[in-house]
Image: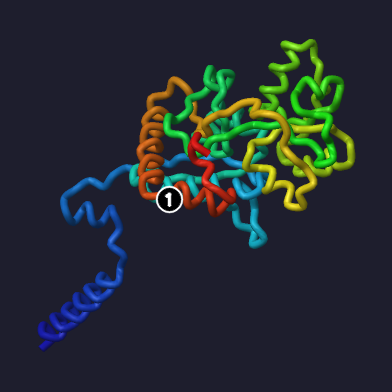
């Protein structure tokens, strides 16, 4: 009788454990063990972005980090099984140094490819946007059509930005003709600086004016000072970074082909700014 009682207890325990097991999520590790396969190793990638770029990378009214670049990174993350992206925010001016010192592995902040940056950093090959940089002035300002018209005047810019590179190169070739005023990368008062007369102008990409100037107090003038592909940035001369860059390229091609990239651009930037053919 005692033997039968012990056997009954063992049977109840076995059934209970089986029932618990049926409600347990089958993780990749468990599935691999059951199937005799080793689960894939997932590489964590720290993505650096900002919080002060309207509709590109910013904190919305609910306290959520979002925007075109942020949601694009999240979409790429979904499609890259071998990688897990961890998005971290910082001041724009700290992004390049953070990449160099390996605090982050990828920059997503509408980074424009130019010769100066290309010497130091790795860019992926497939652009996800295309910029045309122009001069921005007050709507009532009809005296400025070119950088030459800004001689001796204050022009606002942000250190390490593509706009700063254009202006600094112009100054090198023209005896410091422009009075460059540098602002913090997190500043968002560019419109006020121009409308109040503290500065005469600044440079901006074609799509950004509607984002930063909803009251339409400013305008772009003159021809494009530069056109450039927008890409992600990685560390140069690093095989793992090259592998990641190549993987990102393949996903961007998919996003272009299935219309996801154009949809994200239209949703966040107001139009499709994902190719040169705008």
Tell me the quarter of the image containing the N terminus.
bottom left
Relative to 221, is 276 on the left or the right? left
Give the residue displayed 58% in from the left and 38% down from the top. 109
The spot of residue 196 in percent (x, y) is 89, 41
Give the quarter of the image for residue 14. bottom left
Which residue bears the numbered disc 1? 260
Q: Is residue 241 above or below residue 120?
A: below
Give the quarter of the image for residue 100. top right
Residue 7 visible: yes
The spot of residue 162 in percent (x, y) is 64, 28
Residue toward you, 191 or 135: 135
Q: Is residue 248 above or below residue 217?
A: above
Give the residue displayed 67% in from the left and 38% down from the top. 91
Residue toward you, 176 or 249: 176
Question: Extreme front residue here?
Answer: 142
Question: Extreme bottom residue here?
Answer: 1
Q: Is residue 144 above or below residue 67?
A: above
Residue 104 visible: no
Total number of numbered labels? 1
Residue toward you, 62 or 230: 230
**Dot 1 lies on which element?**
helix
Residue toward you, 48 or 263: 263
Give the residue displayed 42% in from the left and 33% down from the top. 126
Colour approach in the figure:
rainbow
The spot of residue 270 in percent (x, y) is 59, 51
Give the residue displayed 76% in from the left and 49% down from the top. 216
Structural crowding at the residue carrying mark 1, measured as other residues with C-alpha within 10 Å and reported as few (<14), some (14–19) or many (≥20)? some
The spot of residue 120 in percent (x, y) is 54, 19
Question: Extreme right residue here?
Answer: 197
């Amino acid at each position: 009788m005692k033997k039968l009682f012990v056997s009954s207890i063992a049977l109840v325990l076995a059934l209970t454990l089986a029932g618990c097991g049926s409600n347990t999520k089958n993780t990749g590790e468990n599935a691999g063990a059951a199937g005799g396969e080793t689960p894939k190793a997932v590489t964590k990638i720290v993505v650096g972005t900002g919080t002060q770029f309207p509709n590109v990378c910013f904190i919305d009214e609910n306290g959520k980090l979002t925007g075109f670049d942020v949601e694009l990174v999240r979409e790429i993350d979904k499609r890259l099984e071998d990688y897990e992206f961890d998005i971290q925010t910082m001041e724009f001016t700290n992004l390049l140094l953070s990449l160099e010192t390996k605090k982050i592995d990828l920059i997503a902040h509408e980074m424009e490819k130019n010769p100066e940056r290309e010497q130091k950093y790795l860019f992926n090959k497939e652009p996800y946007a295309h910029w045309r940089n122009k001069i921005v002035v007050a709507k009532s300002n009809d005296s400025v059509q070119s950088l030459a018209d800004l001689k001796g005047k204050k022009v606002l810019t942000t250190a390490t930005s593509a706009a700063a590179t254009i202006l600094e190169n112009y100054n090198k070739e023209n005896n410091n003709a422009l009075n460059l005023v540098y602002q913090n990368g997190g500043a968002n008062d560019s419109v006020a600086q121009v409308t109040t007369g503290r500065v005469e102008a600044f440079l901006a990409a074609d799509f950004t004016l509607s984002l930063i100037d909803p009251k339409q107090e400013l305008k772009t003038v003159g021809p494009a000072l530069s056109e450039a592909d927008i890409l992600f940035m990685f560390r140069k001369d690093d095989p793992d970074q090259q592998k990641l860059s190549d993987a990102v390229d393949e996903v961007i091609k998919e996003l272009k082909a299935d219309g996801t990239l154009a949809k994200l651009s239209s949703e966040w930037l107001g139009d499709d700014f994902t190719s040169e053919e705008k």
